[in-house]
Amino acid sequence: MSPLLRAAASRGRRLLSSAVDIGGGPSAGPSVLGRVNEAMRRQPLLTSIVVTGAKAAAADLMIQAVVEKRARVDERRVATFGLFGATYQGCVQYFLFNHVLEWWRPGRSVRAVALKIAATNFCLDPVLFFPVFYSLREMLATGELGAHTVTAALAKYRENVFEDLRNSWGVWFPCHAVTYGLMPLHLRMPWVALVSFSYVGLLSFTRGDFDAIVLAEEEKSPASAPAEFAELAEPDSPMAAAERPTPALALGAHTQGLRRLRSTGMYIPSENVPPELIESTTTAAPPPPP
């Protein structure tokens, strides 16, 4: 099995190498793609920063336009995600993938690739990527940055850790086999960025119809709400707390008055929903992969 895997990896690397030289030759010179590849090889860190920063900004822009269907783009949020992509993914992950892991287990043997895949999925992502991502998401949701922001972010991460890791592993176990087994060092982060953007794009387009339905429900007039929730929408309602429907029932039967933040998976009041209802119904959706 091991010789077969090594032969397949060697064949894949030869195909990748020939792909970037298509159109070139002794007389014609290197192709455009070949020249781009050579420029990326000479500046791998700069390539990583530019590609991952652009990917993160473009992914959030697509989510705002396709999933959230915003009338106006939140440019500050796009810039924040772009900065996150350029700094954490472009610099930190570049250093970890291309230097730390290669120093620990150099080469492309089956054992070395398997160990690097395991280290990335079992150590780097759970311990570094997800806590940083949740902290950024909490900062964007609250507009604050401090110790309490990190504490709240880690609490939400603990609630979703198993689902987050399951979704992440489903994508990155096979894709990192390509990262460490086929990709040259200077193309690793562009490859990771491509997979990550494709994954986010798939989620955006497959969830678009559902989110459009939720938005349509949110835009209905409050008068169309069921009678049992009419008083719930009034902040000064004399309705006794014991007589109010449970938050879970309210969330399941009545979407008016709640607006889902699709980038965070949380619900916030669109008008006058009591804060205690929002707090007890807040949920968090799994983030995109690193």
Image (spheres, helix red, strand yellow):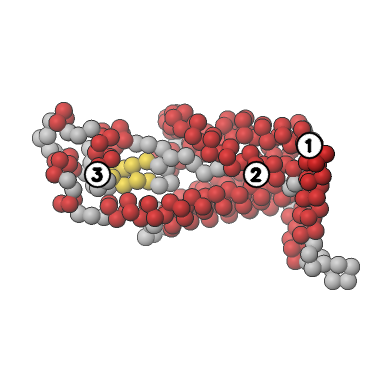
Is the Cβ of the residue at disc 1 closer than 8 Å to that at disc 3?
Answer: no
Q: Residue at x 44, y 30 (%)?
A: 159
Number of numbered discs overlaid on the protein picture: 3
Q: Residue furthest left?
A: 238
How many neighbours does mark 1 have within 10 angstroms: few (below 14), some (14-19), or many (20 or more)? Answer: few
Name which residue type carries label 2: Cys
Residue 171: image location, x then y, percent: 59, 42
Locate residue 209, reporting x and y percent: 39, 55
- Whole-number angstrom distance, CA of label 2 to CA of label 3: 40 Å
Alpha carbon separation for disc pair 1 and 2:
20 Å
Taking depth in this image into account, of 228 and 98 the one nearest to the observer is 228
Specify the quadrant of the image occupied by residue 176. top right
- Horizontal relation, residue 163 to residue 21: left or right: left
Badge 1 is on which residue? Answer: 1
Q: Residues within 10 Å of mark 3 (few under 14, many from 20)?
A: some
Farthest residue, direction bottom = 28
Residue 276 visible from this viewpoint: yes
Specify the amino acid type for callout 1.
Met
Q: Which mark is residue 254?
A: 3
Which mark, by number, is residue 175? 2
Q: Nearer the viewer, residue 211 or 144?
A: 211
Q: Which mark is residue 39?
A: none
Q: Secondary structure at mark 2?
A: helix
Contact? badges 1 and 2 (CB < 8 Å): no
Nearer to us of marks 1 and 2 is 1
Q: What amino acid type should be assigned to the residue bearing mark 3?
A: His
Residue at the farthest front position: 1
Tell me the SS state at disc 3: loop
**Distance between the Cα atoms at labels 1 and 3?**
56 Å
